[in-house]
Amino acid sequence: MKSEILYPGAFPMVRVELAAGENIKAESGAMVACSPTIDIESKMEGGFLGALSRKFLTGEKFFFQTLRASRGPGEALLAPTVPGEIAVLELDGVNEYMVQKDGFLAGADAIVIESQMQSMSRGLLGGEGFFILKISGKGMLVLNSFGAIHKIELKPNQEYIVDNSHLVAWSSTTSYNIEKATSGWVASFTSGEGFVCRFRGPGLVYIQSRNPGSFGAWIRQFIPVSE
Amino acid sequence: MIPNALCFGEEFPASGAPCFVQVGTEGLTIAFEANEDDGVKETTQFSALTVSAGGIDHDHLVVKWNSARSERTLYLRNPDVIQAFREAVPDHLDAPLAQVAERVRQVRHRRRLVWGIVGGAILSTALSLWLGLDILVEVAVSRIPVEWEQKLGESAYRDFLAHQDVVKEGPGVAAVEEMTHRLTEQIQNNPYKFQVTVVKSDVINAFALPGGYVVVFTGLMKKAESGEEVAGVLSHELNHVLQRHGLERIVKSAGLLTVVAIVFGNQQGLIGMMKQLGVELLTLKFGREQETEADLKGLALLQRAKIDPSGMIRFFERLSEKDEGRMEWLSTHPMSAARADRLKTEQAALSKTLPEPFTFDWKQVQASLGSQPVAVP
Ligand SMILES: [Zn+2]
């Protein structure tokens, strides 16, 4: 399996070359185009209950797609819904990443995707919802972001503060606490940007340069309200 | 062979270097190449190691030591390696290892609990489609401790009063205190310490916050023709508190997952959410059923307190005529003649008791509140 990012920047695509018999998991709707040798199967990751809980509680799409090169080698073009960069990570079997639910674009067949419930306080205050994806295993992992994707490298015990709505993915060797950025709970809840995550290394934290929620709010002001 | 640990240190990438850890009798050996003979191998004595729990869920075993070049930190997840490590290590590491193991158990336990909640959420989605959400809301509300409710109400109450002209003493306050006392005396097993504050404002309104915090505006007192009319509104508001109507609304608007979280026992973090909703407490609108319940229970409470319930009915009747200027109470309490009629029927069914009048003279109380009776905009 080989991958290449085409048109890096705001509107990238990723081209994945599959050898005969190889397959890749992709977020449903990510497939743009593919060779005729490739079959698209929709499959529920983590069994029915897993898929159901993801659907109900994260609002995520019910299925992942599996793109399988069943009739000979071929390639597939994948792209995310939102404008923003793509990053390809190579998992080596020991690295694990927590991925915010909109951050997953695709992954090799041997990577394992679990939805994991966060602690109550992280779920309520963290902004990524109650569920995040925990991705482990071996092989390629493709992340997508809103805006540019930026990697923060943390040495053991090194700290960094990230606004929670800019989080894309982070190593499971990091830890974080949710903190209030502004003083006063009312301010925190009404401004919406009141919470930050204080990360502690070692590990990597991937962040996106734009905040989807704020962008949505900004764009709403231009949409005429129908009565 | 798959690496079984990540090694961090100055000379390694921030994502950690995948490595192979072997537990020997003397110490820990790490190699960075799969083939035994290739590459660098380092062995560190057990005595040089310190251990702790780490990682996003505190379920990694973190082993630290100082190598010749830099401080090394090893993150281990592999159960076989951890097991071997536990068996081989000398006594000085036993206690910290036991702590790590305890921490991992806690994380697993929490995860099981959490999935219990998820299962519960799915189950209760099905149940609520079947039975209606109301039963679940009721169960959830019944599990919220009164102290929480008080904390919630108190913060909203204090925020509100900070910007208001509070009447601290005088005949108006004394009269409201007398009414409150007469009413609350008749409430059995009352878990609330009701606090009623008179606020100087021409707004014709009164409201109650969860936990027993009640505000009566002087506008309402000026509008009322007798103490019994105000007592009627008070009795209605007290019953919103007693029936926990505010909480019901909050839980309903907070959504199913919150309900499930409360029912299944994980109450942590909810205070934060309640606080968020506390902001909206002042504009909380009750449902029609809740209003009816507060009316009927309020009427019964008046009866027990030997306060003439006709006052409440008369006041409601006058409000339903809707020609009264700034009737703020109307915005949260849609009035209808039917509502007053219902109370009349109910009153007729109650046994007749001789009402005991209040000790104050209502005209004098009103006179103490200021001259202008109602500001009509
Ligand atoms: Zn009411």
Image (spheres, helix red, strand yellow):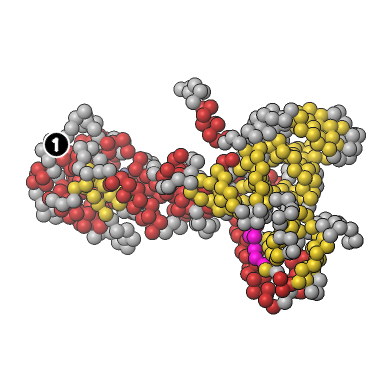
Q: Is residue B54 magenta?
A: yes
Tell me if mark 1 has few (under 14), some (14-19) or many (20+) residues whose alpha carbon lies within 10 angstroms of its own: some
Residue A219 x %, y %: 53, 27
Residue B271, horizontal then vertical, whole percent: 45, 53
Up-down: is B141 above or below B44? above
Label 1 marks a residue whose chain is: B
* In the image: residue B361, left or right of residue A177: left
The furthest residue to the bottom = B91
Residue depicted at 57% across the width and 45% down the height: A162
Q: In which quarter of the image is residue B225?
A: top left
- Element at badge 1? loop
Residue A68 in sight in this render? no
What residue does disc 1 label?
B373
Residue B221: x and y in percent read: 18, 43
**Residue drawn at x 74%, y 66% as measured from the top left:** B82
Total labels: the figure holds: 1
Q: Can you tell which quarter of the image residue A215 is in?
A: top right
Spot occupied by residue A44 in the image (x, y as percentages of width and height): 73, 43
In the rendered image, the vertical position of residue B206 relative to residue B104, given as above or below:
above
Relative side of A119 to B358, left or right: right
Q: Give the residue displayed 21% in from the left and 32% down from the top.
A: B324
Q: Report the magenta residues as a range.
A: B51-58
Q: What residue type is labelled 1?
A: Pro
Image quarter where the N terminus of chain A lies is top right
Residue drawn 51% across the image and 23% down it: A223
